[in-house]
Amino acid sequence: MIAQIVIILVLLFFLFVIFVAYKMVKPPRFIGDWTPKDLGFDYEDVTFESGDGLKLSGWWIDNGSEKTVIPLHGYTRSRWDDVYMKPVTEFLLKEGYNVLTFDFRAHGKSEGNYTTVGDREIEDVRGAVEWLVENHPERAKRIGLVGFSMGAVLTIRALAEINGVCCGVADSPPIDMDRTGARGLKYFANLPEWLYTFVKPLTKLVSGARELNVMDYADKVRKPLLLIQGDSDPLIKVDEVRAFYEKNRGVNPDVELWVTDAPHVRTLKLHPEEWKAKVGEFFRKYL
């Protein structure tokens, strides 16, 4: 009898882990109702292919500049996010840059069944850059990125892996993906962090994601990079981002670290003028 109860409990636990893993790699699609027209700018709905063939949905806002910035949203969000994507899009347009913004795979209106939280999404960024260069070469003479959370990881990766990108801002980048993933269970679902040990292998099995070590890129990024991290962030610790910064500045004289008092991706919301001044100065210098 006891053995049967144990077997049932183990089976229920395993089914619960499968459910959690599935929900992690297939988050609800966030689709809003605002457009760049609400910010006072004309725009074009665009569809382009990722580097591995998925159709991605986005907006192209031609501001008449030779310089374009691509904002990159975080896990579970989309171009419609109004905490950081809406204000950063408005800020960049008012600074005079063109903006290409899109939904990562399995987010918003883009194709894709599962997110890999920073692994295969590099092909999404590659597709965006290639679309821009091929369709608007006169607007792609200088391309910058500004990414938040998962998008910040992709910003770091793109600086090392995509030739057309010249500089980037990484706001709240998960440097230790496992620790951030474990904390994320508590942050997003109020589940214990130890459960991540069981959930992680299944998320990789379902999504096909490969192991991603962001710290490895500290030896590879040689382009201007601004790291922004808040010390009230429940997902990412300042020391983790600082470790990346310290390692990267050994090979990259143009890396900067700005530590704030904000929670996850909330520096722009809590300190909008300081954020805009810091990021504006960075892009004026390097873009």
Image: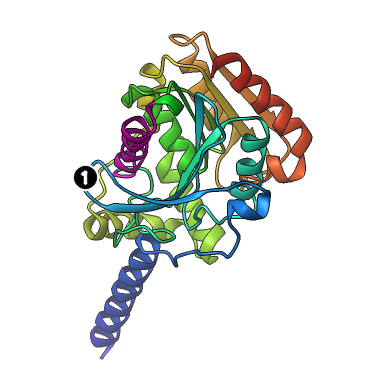
Give x and y (percent) for residue 217: 37, 24
Give x and y (percent) for residue 286: 55, 16
Give x and y (percent) for residue 249: 50, 12
Q: Can the viewer see residue 174 in this picture?
A: no
Given residues 273 and 16, the one toward you in this image is: 273
236 with respect to 267 (left or right):
left
Q: Give the range drawn in magenta.
A: 120-137
- Label 1: element kind: loop
23 is within the stretch colored magenta? no
Q: Quadrant of the N terminus?
A: bottom left
Given residues 95 and 222, the one toward you in this image is: 95
Give x and y (percent) for residue 94: 68, 35
Instruction: List the residue tagged with mark 1.
Output: 52
Q: Which amino acid does label 1 sit on?
A: Asp
- The residue located at (27%, 60%) in the rendering is 202
Q: Quadrant of residue 128?
A: top left
Q: In which quarter of the image is the C terminus?
A: top right
Q: Quadrant of residue 106?
A: bottom left
- The residue located at (67%, 38%) in the rendering is 91
Please rate how many residues cluster around mark 1, counting C-alpha atoms within 10 Å: few if below 14, some from 14 to 19, many from 20.
few
Given residues 244 and 123, the one toward you in this image is: 123
Q: Main secondary structure of the magenta part?
A: helix
Given residues 191 and 226, the one toward you in this image is: 226
Q: Which residue lies furthest to the bottom in this view?
A: 1
Q: Can the viewer see residue 118 in this picture?
A: yes
